[in-house]
Image (cartoon, grey):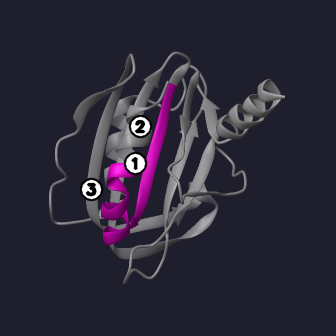
Amino acid sequence: MKFALGLCLLTATLAHAEPAGGLSWTAPAGWKEQPARAMRAATYAVPKAAGDAEDGECAVFYFGAGQGGAVQANIERWYGQFESSAKPPAPRAGKAGKYKVTYVEHSGTYRSGGPMMAAPPVKKPGFRLLGAIVEGPQGSVFFKLTGPAKTVAASSAAFEKMISAIR
């Protein structure tokens, strides 16, 4: 009986782990998994911070081995989704287990939607991006957290903890 209970608890714990590209991660507590969407391995609603009008979103993309483009090309595309007079900070290197991670951030007016997202573009001032590109064993996995600046700031430690715990 103890074994069965332990197995049930283990299964419940692992149920929240997500896999893509040979990597697995667990979304932070409070983030709500959203329905499947085209081109995404996972999507999470990130609860809005006090005073913000909307939740943030963490989109996870995996396109397959050798797919999805180079790290720098993705960084430039993400930065290009913002209208800002400020230059974004330089990407920084990190590790998730034995995997190389490139972290990026930017802020300004975010242009969400557009032709690739099959939605009309919407300008969202006061938004922020935290991104992490993890070079996994089966290709890169792209983690992109966007939302109102306070919401993203309030979730930044949880985002980095999720990325650093990837296996």
Query: Which element is circle 2 on?
Result: helix
N-terminal of the pair, mark 3 or mark 1, is 3
Query: Which element is circle 1 on?
Result: helix
Q: Which residue is drawn at 31% across and 71% down?
A: 150
Residue occupied by mark 3:
106
113 versus 13 height, above or below = below
Q: Nearer the viewer, residue 96 or 134?
A: 96
N-terminal of the pair, mark 3 or mark 2, is 3
Eye-nearest disc, 3 or 2: 2
Q: Is residue 90 left or right of residue 19?
A: left
**Given contact means CB atoms under 8 Å apart, are the residues at marks 1 and 2 in contact?**
yes
What residue type is disc 3 on?
A: His
Q: How far apart are marks 1 and 2 (CA)?
A: 6 Å
> Badge 1 local density, few (<14 within 10 Å), some, or many (20+)?
many
Residue 104, quarter of picture:
top left
Q: How far apart are marks 3 and 2 (CA)?
A: 18 Å
Q: Which of 65 and 16 is in front in this view?
A: 16
Q: Where is residue 68 in the image (x, y as percent from the top left)?
A: 51, 32
Residue occupied by mark 2:
163
Q: Where is residue 101 in the image (x, y as percent from the top left)?
A: 34, 29
Q: Which of 97 and 92 is in front in this view?
A: 97
Q: In this view, does 85 lie to the left or right of 6?
A: left
Q: Is residue 29 left or right of residue 160?
A: right
Q: Quadrant of the N terminus?
A: top right
Range of residues picked out in magenta: 140-158
What residue type is disc 2 on?
A: Ile
88 versus 134 height, above or below = below
Residue occupied by mark 1:
159
Residue 92, quarter of picture:
top left
Q: Which residue is drawn at 42% across and 60% down?
A: 146
